Amino acid sequence: MTQRVAIVGIGQTNHSGRRPYHNDGEVIYDAISAALADAQLSIKDIDNVIIGDMELFEGHSLNDAMLLDYTGAEGRSGFKMNTGGTVGSMNVISGWYNVASEFSDTTLVIGWEKHDEGPTTSAITTIWDPAINRPFEVGAISGLAMISNAYMTRSGCPLEVGAIVRAQASDNAARNPKAHLRERYTVQDVMSARMVLYPLNLLMICPTSLGACALVLAGEKKARKINKKPVWIRDHATAHQVTRGMDFMAEAGKIDTSMTVTGRKIFQRNHITKPMEEIQVFEMYDPCAFCQPAWLEEFGLCEAGQGWRLIEKGVTAREGSFPVSPSGGTLCTNAIGDTATVRVAEAALQLRGDAGEHQVTREVKMALASGYGGMYWTDLLLLSNTLD
Amino acid sequence: MANEVVKKEPMFTEGYVIMPYKYSVGTLASKFFIEIRDHKKINGVKCPKCNIVIVPPRSVCIKCFNKIEDLVELSGKGTLVTYTVAHYDSAVQAMKPPYAIGVIKLDGADTAITHFIGEVDFKELKAGMKLEAVFNETRNANILDIKYFKPVKNKG
Ligand SMILES: [Zn+2]
C-alpha cells in the first residue's frame, strides 16, 4: 500500500517586505490559485490540505483554523505543521506521507508567512530555553553568528567568502521575479555593510519577507495524467537535533549534525557515491552567508575544509558545476513558513526547466532541497524528473 | 472625471499580547542554580552510563537516553569555543549593544554553555582562549547569577 509521489503543481507569490492591502489569507490564496492553475486542477480535485507557518509571527495562532476558507481545507482532511524553520519542508514531507500511503491521491501543501505583521525577533526568542539560553540569544541570528564563527575558525574560511556567497545570491535573485531582495551587490558592497552580529553583517543574514508558496502533490498514476512534467520526490530524510548540537558536542565529533545525518541517509539509500556529479543543483535553506560553505561539507557533498574553496572557485554559481540556491536562496527571500517550501518548488522548477532567467546552465536530472530550523534541525529532499 | 484616481488606504487592526511565564527549571537544574546562588559553584551532570558530563544540566543523557540524577563539581574555568559580538538592539535583549556572547566549554565538561563575555577587548576574543566565571554579588538562583565569563589573566 504505497505509491510514488510527484509534484504536479507549483505556485508562488512574489515576495516583498510589505503588502499592506492584503491579509494573510489573500496572500495564501494567490499561491494556491497559481499552483492549481499550474496543475490545471480545481480545489474540487484536492483530497487533503497541509499548511504551516511560524507560530505567533502574525500575532495569531491556530492559523489553519482561522484561515480555513482561504486554504480550501473546508470539509477536507489535513494537518498543520509547526516545526519552526523546517515547517515549509515538513509540509511537503507530510504531504508525501499522505499520498505515498494512499491515504490521499492529491494533497495541497502550503507554506506562508507575513513577516511585516508581528515582532518576529520577540516571537523567535521564545524558542530558547527560558532557564538556560533565553537571556543571551538574539532571535535566530546569534546562533547563526556563532556557528559561522566556529566554521571560519575550524576551516580557515575568510570573511570574504561570506561576501562572495551573498554577491552571488544577489545576482541570482536579480534574475528571479519571485525573490524579495533583488538588488545586485558586489563583494565589496557586501563587505562594507553594517555589522549586526559578528561575523554577520546586514547583508549576510536573511531578510524578513512576506509571501506564500503552494505545491500540489499527486500519486504516480494521477500525476502522469495531470502533468507532462511531474517532478518525483525520490527520498527525504529528517534529523532533529538539540540546541546548537548540544552546544558543540557535534563540533567535538561526539555527535553528528543534522546535516550529516540526513546527507548520509539520502546518499546511502539512493546509492549516490559522487553527489556533486550525480546531483546537479541544490536549493539549500541558507539563512546566513556561511551556511553554504559549512553545510556543503556537513551534508557530505565535499570534504571537510573544502566548502569555502569550492565557492571561491565559482563551483556554486548559477553557471557553475554545482549551483547552490540559483533562486537567490534564503539570503534574499525569507518568509519563514514558506522558505523551505520555496526550496522544494525552486528545485522542482529547475528539474522541469521552468526556472526562467535563473535556470542553471547545467542539465538537471536530480536535485536536492533542504529545510533548516526548529533547533538545528534539517530536512533533506531528493527530487528527480524521471523515475529511472 | 473619468480619470479620477481613487486613493485607497490600507486598514490595520493593531494590538499587543503580554505573555508572562513562570518556567519550572526542573529537579536537577534547581540543584544547579542553588549551588550557584549559595556557593558560587557551576556544576555539571554526569551520565552514569556513558560518563559524559553535561552543562547546563539536563536530566536525560543526549547520547544514551539514560536518566541523570547527580551533579559533579566543575572549576568554573573553561575555554571559549565560539562567540559573536552583538551590534544589534531589540526589545528582547538583556543588554545594550555592543556586547559579546560566547559558547564556553568548562573544564571537565563535554558540552558547552552560552553566556556573556565581559572585561574583554572584543579584538582579543579568540576561540580557544581561557575564561573564568564572574558571579554577581546578589544572586537569585538563575543563569544571570553568573555575571559573565572573563579572560583568565596569565600569571607572570
Ligand atoms: Zn549517557
Image (tube, rainbow, N blue to C red):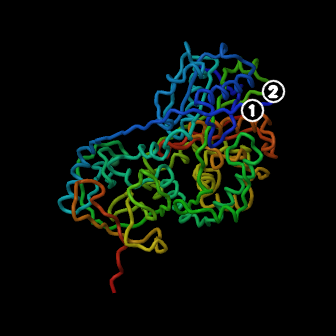
**Tag 2 subunit:** B
- Looking at the picture, which amino acid does disc 2 mark? Ala
- Relative to residue A135, is residue B133 depicted above or below? below
Q: Secondary structure at mark 1?
A: loop
- Location of the C terminus of chain A by quadrant is top right
Q: Report the front residue among A188 and A224.
A: A188
- Relative to residue B152, is residue B60 depicted above or below? above
Q: Residue B93, position in %: x, y?
A: 41, 54
Give the crowd class for mark 1: few <14, some 14-19, many >=20 residues within 10 Å: few
Q: Is mark 2 within 8 Å of ligand 1?
A: no
In the drawing, what numbered circle is on residue B22?
none
- Location of the N terminus of chain A by quadrant is top right
Q: Are marks 2 and 1 in contact (CB under 8 Å)?
A: no
Q: Is residue A269 visible?
A: no
- Looking at the picture, which amino acid does disc 1 mark? Val
**Tag 1 subunit:** B
Q: Which residue is mark 2?
A: B2
Q: Is residue A154 visible?
A: yes
Res B130 quadrant in image: bottom left
Q: Residue B33, position in %: x, y?
A: 24, 54
Q: Report the front residue among A343 and B60.
A: A343
Q: Report the front residue among A189 and A318.
A: A189
Q: Which residue is mark 1?
A: B5
Q: Is residue A31 left or right of residue A353?
A: left
Q: Residue A174, position in %: x, y?
A: 75, 48
Of all residues shown, which one is farthest toward the front?
A: B1
Of all residues shown, which one is farthest toward the left?
A: B38
Q: Secondary structure at mark 2?
A: loop
Give the crowd class for mark 2: few <14, some 14-19, many >=20 residues within 10 Å: few
